[in-house]
């Protein structure tokens, strides 16, 4: 499955139905949870954390995932760029993590933001599971024609 953004959340934000604040982590807290390859995202219809299935479990991993830190939302050459510090689970034993799901833990029902496919399943045994975001950001939206 390819990585992508959850359309319903962005549609709701653009219509003013939810107050999604991608740039202010004092207003919104974003979390990153790990899922196995058994979860298939539907970018058109999945809109809340409750739609996500097959979250990993294991030592050093808390259900719901980890909070993102140093979140930034900026404009660069006609694109919107959303990024955060790399996230990790230290001293963890995690099996078959195939993707990350980012959601807003502050808003009602925890709206989904993004699904990041790892391109395979990864595990740790009493080690550090770390996601290093792309240097161009977690996601970039090119708004120039």
Image (cartoon, helix red, strand yellow):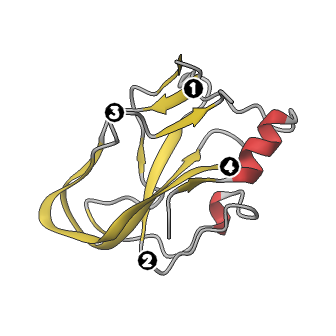
Kindly report which numbered mark, 4 or 1, lies closer to the viewer in this rendering: 1
Task: Say above or below: 74 vs 60.
Answer: above
**Circle 2 residues within 10 Å: few <14, some 14–19, many ≥20:** many
Q: CA distance from mark 2 to mark 4?
A: 21 Å
Q: CA distance from mark 4 to mark 3?
A: 20 Å
Kindly report which numbered mark, 2 or 4, lies closer to the viewer in this rendering: 2
- The disc placed on residue 85 is 3
Residue at x 35%, y 67% (from the top left corner): 119
Kindly report which numbered mark, 1 or 2, lies closer to the viewer in this rendering: 1
Q: Nearer the viewer, residue 53 or 59?
A: 53
Task: Say above or below: 133 vs 85.
Answer: below
Identify the element where label 4 is drawn: loop
Q: Which residue is mark 1?
A: 79
The answer to which of marks 2 and 3 sits earlier in the sequence is 2
**Circle 1 residues within 10 Å: few <14, some 14–19, many ≥20:** few
Q: CA distance from mark 1 to mark 2?
A: 30 Å
- The disc placed on residue 37 is 2
Identify the element where label 2 is drawn: loop
Residue at x 42%, y 35% (from the top left corner): 137
The answer to which of marks 3 and 1 sits earlier in the sequence is 1
The answer to which of marks 2 and 4 sits earlier in the sequence is 2
Q: Residue furthest bottom?
A: 38
Circles 1, 2 touching at the beta carbon (< 8 Å): no
**In the displayed structure image, the side of residue 45 where residue 115 appears, left or right:** left
Q: Which residue is mark 4?
A: 111
Q: CA distance from mark 3 to mark 1?
A: 20 Å
Image quadrant of residue 92? bottom left
């Amino acid at each position: 499955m390819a990585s992508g953004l959850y359309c319903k959340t962005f549609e709701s934000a653009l219509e003013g139905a939810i107050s999604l604040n991608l740039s202010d982590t004092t207003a919104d807290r974003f979390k990153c949870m790990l899922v196995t390859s058994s979860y298939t995202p539907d970018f058109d219809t999945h809109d809340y954390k409750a739609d996500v299935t097959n979250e990993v479990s294991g030592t050093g991993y808390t259900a719901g995932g980890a909070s993102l830190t140093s979140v930034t939302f900026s404009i660069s050459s006609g694109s919107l760029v959303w990024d955060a510090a790399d996230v990790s689970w230290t001293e963890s034993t995690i099996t078959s993590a195939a993707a990350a799901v980012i959601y807003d833990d502050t808003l009602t029902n925890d709206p989904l933001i993004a699904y990041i496919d790892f391109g395979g399943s990864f595990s740790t045994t009493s080690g550090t599971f770390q996601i290093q975001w792309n240097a161009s950001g977690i996601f970039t939206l090119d708004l120039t024609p």
